[in-house]
Image (spheres, grey):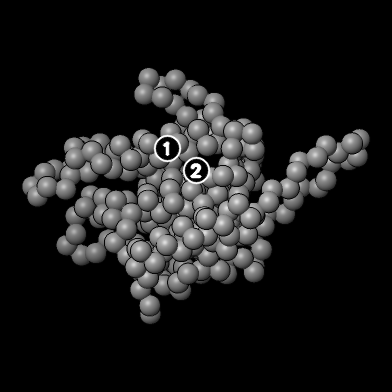
Amino acid sequence: MVFLSQAVVHDCLLTKADSRASVSQKSKGKPNGKKPAPEEKKLYLEPEYTKSRITDFEFKELVMLPREIDLNEWLASNITTFFCVCFSATTFFHHINLQYSTISEFCTGESCQTMAVCNTQYYWYDERGKKIKCTAPQYVDFVMSSVQKLVTDEDVFPTKYGKEFPNSFESLVKKICKYLFHVLAHIYSSHFKETLALELHGHLNTLYTHFILFIREFNLVDPKETTVMDDLTEVLCSSSGSSSNGSSNSAAAQNHVKER
């Protein structure tokens, strides 16, 4: 099996990102009195695209806690130094951020006026607990800024020998994973066409599969939170040794508004 270095994946994503200008967005014309078109099929569920990966590695085995490794150390390493057969010694946070950056040109305040995934809408809460309705790019910026602040905080993610993790560490990791899931789900829901045009769907599928199996292994995100993407999870993760938790609740989640 060929191991791809961080530089290779990084250069590949950046090269694709440079070609974003060639991706055209379809205009959203008014129906002019005609009946609205039927709901568009979810392109990311098409078999020809779901089978695309950049590796066939068994991720279920990769995310399991190794023997004699502290759980917090393992969670921290997977969040900040997510070792992977396809992403060598790089960060999970970094790759989700980079994946989003490839389509950020198309995720604007005009095209994505709310942070939405299918019929689910997400809100941001500031440090005082104030609920903020924001555009998708604003929400993603809030996510990336807050996660960056956490993962570089020595008191939260200690790197010095002998320094203990805080008591709130697990809850903070869960919060980070929840935020990152929102970003991945938004890319699929609103920007898969652009991702496909850039030929980055294989990277996105691989990243999503690894992420979902990781958060399931350690129960880091409430299954109710991820039901909005259960159809995709079932397809991508069923072949990776993982069953779909809560897939029967997918329909109920369609009209549920998430608040964060």
Q: Earlier in the sequence, mark 1 or mark 2?
A: 1
| Residue 119 position (above or below residue 245) | above
**For the residue carrying disc 1, how many other residues have a C-alpha within 10 Å: few (<14), some (14-19), or many (20+)?**
many
The structure residue drawn at horizontal position 84% and vertical position 41%, both measured from the top left corner, is 36
Identify the residue position indicated by label 2 in the image.
182
Which residue is denoted by mark 1 in the rendering?
A: 143
Spot occupied by residue 216 in the image (x, y as percentages of width and height) = 41, 54
- From the top left corner, tell me how far across and down residue 8 is, in percent: 39, 67
Specify the label residue 240 is tagged with: none
Give whichever of 129, 29 is nearer the camera: 29
**SS class of the residue under badge 2?**
helix
Q: Residue at x 72, y 54 (%)?
A: 41
Q: CA distance from mark 1 to mark 2?
A: 9 Å
Q: Residue at x 13, y 43 (%)?
A: 164
Which kind of residue does numbered mark 2 sit on? His
Contact check, label 1 and label 2, Cβ < 8 Å: yes
* Three-letter amino acid code at the position of disc 1: Val
Depth check: give the residue in front, 110 or 206: 110
Q: Position of residue 248 (x, y in %)?
A: 59, 51
Quadrant location of the N terminus in the rendered image:
bottom left
Is 123 above or below relative to 172? above
- The answer to whether one can see residue 80 in this image is yes
